[in-house]
Amino acid sequence: MRVRRFVLDGLVLLVATSLIVAVSCSKQTQEPIKIGAVFSVTGPASFLGEPEKNTVLMLRDQINKAGGINGRTVEIIIEDSKSDETQAVVAAKKLIEKEKVVAIIGPSTTGESMALVPIVTAAKVPMISCAAGAAITQPVADRFWVFKTAQYDTSAVERIFDYMKKKGITSVGIVSVSTSFGDAGRKALLEIAPNYGIKIVADEKYGPKDTDMTAQLVKIKEAKAQAIINWSVGPGQAIITKNWAALKMNIPLYQSHGWGSKKNIELAGPDAEGVIAPLGRLVIWDKLADTHPQKVALKKYASDYRALYKTEPSTFGGHAHDALLIAVEAIKKAGTDRGKIRDYIETGITKWVGASGVYNISKTDHTGMTKDAFDMVVVRAKDWALLD
């Protein structure tokens, strides 16, 4: 009897233990998947971070409504970098060490992204930046854990010079903002221009807080440039545009790919008429042919964003759109192990259609887009229009 009782007690204990383990595993399986985001929600670069934040919150709700990722809900933990590199580092460490996120999307700017490269590399956490600087993902050997969804600044430069060559422009004056974004663009302009037979006849700079760039533009005018290229993002773009119009320079003004927000047209007012820029297709999706590979995805994103937020999406929100969905795709296929997520992004995101372009990420290219991700766009009647 005692032996039988011992066996029964053992079976009861085994069953109870199994139930506890099963409940524990079930609970663990149902825990949300945490994805971190570092955006410039406030501060000077909030025009980038605000649409990025709005976009990922909208997508989070859509993903969870559709059943989450493999049955698990997605939790997006957004940290505001306040447009500051030091704060971005603090935010990333919090997401990695406290929140235990499986991946990070963002930051919004090139400078903040560069500051996070050593952080995510040491922690072995995949990061998908929303900024443009080529140095964010190059050289790839030193950026093993880093990807980005904004098209290369070098690709934007090539697209501008392609168009200028077509128009017979051979002498250009450049003006750039003294930030990581501006410095990277200036470097690309100076290095690539000779490949197109274009001479840089003036090279001017200004600070991110400057409110008048007339002096720089006068020097470009005196240098007899056939066109101006301004490389900046944010308020400086509208200021340059107003100064250019006030000086009646009668030469075309080209902006960087950071021009891709209707707010820039609004800030510059009628002076924006005729300004040219290489832009991703999100801003002109309705002007694309129905057969264009991005048309369906762009229409859905733009329509959903407009319906929810009562405003037009910007190029910058598009970068966050792609960053989050690439992370989700990797988690869906590879699980929540950080290393496996990284590996899938590097090898599995090919011919992947996003808002910023069609991605072909590889072991030698952690952005996966070329100059073909851009169209040349001009401002006409307070709206975007495609150039031939």
Image (tube, rainbow, N blue to C red):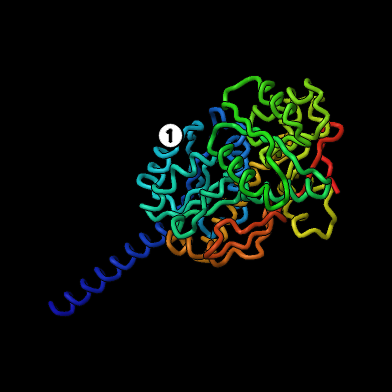
How far across and how far down the image is residue 214, in percent? 69, 21
Indicate the secondary structure of the residue bearing disc 1.
Answer: helix
Q: Is 197 in front, or is 299? A: 197
Residue at image coords 84%, 57%: 290
Residue under numbered circle 1: 87
Residue at image coords 64%, 44%: 189
From this view, report whether residue 96 is shown above or below residue 384.
Answer: below
Residue at image coords 85%, 35%: 380
Residue at image coords 60%, 40%: 186
Count of all numbered marks drawn on residues in the image = 1
Residue 64 appearing in the image:
no
Q: Is 336 in front, or is 2? A: 336
Residue 301 appearing in the image:
yes
**Quarter of the view holding residue 386:** top right
How far across and how far down the image is residue 20, in percent? 32, 62
Mark 1 neighbour class, 10 Å CA radius: few under 14, some 14 to 19, many 20 or more: some
The N terminus: image quadrant = bottom left
Which residue is the extreme one toward the left? 2
From this view, report whether residue 139 is shown above or below residue 255.
Answer: below
**Would residue 222 appear left or right of 250 to someone viewing this image?**
left
**Would residue 219 appear left or right of 116 to someone viewing this image?**
right
How far across and how far down the image is residue 87, in percent? 43, 34
Tag 1: amino acid = Gln
Q: Is 111 in front, or is 164? A: 164
